[in-house]
Image (cartoon, grey):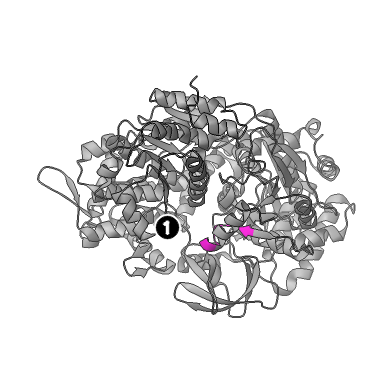
Amino acid sequence: MRTLPEPFAGWFAGRGWTPRPHQLALLDAAARGEHVLLLAPTGGGKTLAGFLPSLVDLAGTPRDGLHTLYISPLKALAVDIARNLTAPAAEMGLPITIETRTGDTPVNRRQRQRERPPNLLLTTPESLTLLLSLPDAPEMFAGLSAIVVDEAHALAGTKRGDQLALCMSRLGMLAPAARRVGLSATVAHPDLLRAWISPTAKADDVRLIQTKGGAAPVFDLQLPEGRLPWGGHMGLASAPEIYRRIEAARVTIVFVNTRAQAELIFAALWRLNEAALPIAMHHGSLEIGLRRKVEAAMAEGRLRGVVATASLDLGIDWGDVDQVIQVGAPKGVSRLLQRVGRANHRMDEPSRAVLVPANRFEVVECVAATEAVEAGDLDGEPPRPGGLDVLAQHVLAMACSAPFRSDDLYAEVTRAGPYAALTRRDFDDVVGFVEDGGYALAAYDRFRRLFRDAEGFLHIRGQAAARQLRMNLGTIVEQPLLKVRLRGGGVLGEVEEYFVSTLEPGDCFLFGGQVLRYERLDPAAIIVSRGGEGEPRVPVYGGSRMPLTTYLASRVRAILHDPRRWKHLPEPVKEWLRLQRLKSELPPRDGLLVETFPRGGKWFLVAYTFEGKLAHQTLGMLVTKRMERLGMGPLGYVGTDYVLAIWSAFEPKDVAALFTEDILGDEMEEWLAESSMLRRTFRNIATIAGLIEKTHPGAEKSGRQMTMNSDLIYDVLRRHQPDHILLRATRAEAAQGLTDIARIATLLARVQGRIRHRALKQVSPLAVPALIEEGREWVAGGAEDALLAEAAALVEDATDGAEHFAETLAEVTESVPVRGTSVARAKSRDRRRGGRYIRSTPKMVSGR
């Protein structure tokens, strides 16, 4: 094993540090020219290990130009790492230049970086793509020695990861000797991550360095002092306990799962903040300047707590954070470890986390997650094949840099892990689409972006196409957003266009930790003032809810099924499960329990599927279509992360026939043909592929304009070229991800011959949370009192009076009610507004 040279050895010794074995192992790998994937726990010095060989090389052989490229999934992380590297480099007197390049970098610095690149450039996948699209990219990257990818597990398997893999493949052509280093937390599929890092798409070409050990995290389960809620997913009942935890610690990060939850939890904590503790909020819809202020205040130790979403999941090194509080179930073991690692960001000290489940099912999920951590088990889906829409954007970006031959680019692309199995037909179709839009669109000049010369080289068709590409680069397609602008003041952040369309002047809503009054809509912004009367609403963001992982769902089922595994459950949950076993039965581990019972003039079917809310929404649509065919008169459904509940006019019979594998045939095709799902998916894919512009020189398009354009093109392609490459990509993506078809197929295959139907006379204890959810979501206006009485009656029925009305009152009023929508209204609104539903709203399946 190599040793540290001076001045590095002296710098380490001066701080009382000893280089960790994996840091020295990376020095050794660099000397051998090896590509490396380093897996190490949070706080293990991964980032320093990744940079150490570059710093040592530059200290021994100073030089001008770009030596090391560091890619981060977060701009804030790149800025933080640059700050952390600059100080030790200055202390050791190293002749090294370090700069960041992100969307926030000023224009003059960007130009200077192209003319005189720094030794270490820290950037993001989007900025790297833009740099590679420039004509001088070969000169800028020719001397590159190392590529360091931080938080690699957060990129691989995503479209941003596809984009980065293609960029690394291009860098492999421009700088063949550059070694690659992937830095990651421990993952469930290390060989697939090695293949993603590899310059040949082969795992064996990347050395795996894995660090074991480190102090085990310490978990604590925090329940509300009052009664544990049956339903609801915001966790507001535990706000007093969360506040006391913040008060007793130095610095706390309170992680939540959605932006709406962040707003509600922050507001609840602020109401309790009699000690005026400095507490802030951080989520992706807040204005970037506000987020940077929060990050700086945390780094400087000026905050006692911050309420955050996944916007702070990764990497920023705040060593003084001594406590993480996870409000709501974590939804995944790896995700929980990532968040817990933000506390005591040091490998040798235990990270301390408090889990705050919002309801009884979430208690079981939290226990399942902590047991998995103790067992050293991880979860996470394996990376999927690369997206063809991302490839189309990359093809055009590379044409902007220099002309290319199709054969050469195909060979380059298939050296990227996500595209190793890409067929030549798909590649040629993608290039043909970029060239002229494809057969059905070739007559329109606006879709002609490339041309071929006599020697077979493909060239960009003018600088207008290049400008358009650079203005629309990236793979993150959010719902249409409008800025929130304070009257007479600055921008506070952004909300979805759909949410704004539901507001009337005078309505108030919660955003950025304050109550805002909606006044009017200006182009691309809503004007608000502070304050307002009435109960504030909370913006809902599409796609923000995290899915329950398959692995964790399996553990939840195992705990529920086996009373011997209840030892870590609190007494209220044990009693709940005992009541369930008495009145019905416990869900099987590998089968499916389906309960049916009458209530309020309707029949209810509750299936304990445990496949996550997204899968349950799709499954609910498929099952209700089957119920319609069988004459059961389905009226609506709601899916939580744990169960699917359907209500109907007639008693469901032959329940097993509702969950056969062929439901993914006719019902699936019929639903996809009727729904706007494929249209929404197509719009996202067409935007990434460059067919639909997000931004045009001199103007930014509204969401409605983008939707109209994409719908028109979608209809043209379906009619005239149904096998168009973007339609094929749309169908593949809908099946792979947006509808969770794979999870539904696995569920249906697993339960065949193992479906247990219990016909009950009344609601069972385990069904109560779903029915409370159904009741809460449908409440409108003056019906709230009736809802509270109904929810109390549900608990009374399930427990024979063992619970009290006060518990139900607390949990039902925990979240803001929203109006239900009939299927006719939903479809009409869906067409008008780009196919957006509020995720939490149950669907009605008929006009009855």
Q: Give the extent of the magenta segment.
A: 281-289
**Badge 1 local density, few (<14 within 10 Å), some, or many (20+)?**
many
**Camera-side residue of 559 and 752:** 559
**Camera-side residue of 94 and 690:** 94
Observer able to see residue 827 = yes
Residue furthest toward the top? 1
Task: Report the side of 524 relative to 537 (left or right).
Answer: left
Report x, y in % for residue 545. Answer: 59, 52
- Residue at 58 percent across and 50 percent down: it is 312
Q: How many marks?
A: 1
Residue marked by disc 1 = 679
Does residue 201 show up magenta in the picture? no
| Above or below 189: residue 427 | below
Could you say whether the residue bearing mark 1 is in a helix, strand or loop? helix
- Residue at 36 percent across and 50 percent down: it is 727
Residue furthest toward the left? 454
Report x, y in % for residue 827. Answer: 51, 65
Q: Quadrant of residue 372?
A: top right
Amino acid type at mark 1: Arg
Observer able to see residue 187 = no
Report x, y in % for residue 564. Answer: 80, 30
Quarter of the figure that contains the C terminus:
bottom right
| Above or below 713: residue 21 | above
Q: Quadrant of residue 39?
A: top right
Task: Report the side of 717 relative to 819 (left or right).
Answer: left
Task: Report the side of 449 relative to 21 (left or right).
Answer: left
Report x, y in % for residue 272. Answer: 78, 63
**Camera-side residue of 391 and 272:** 272
| Above or below 562: residue 365 | below
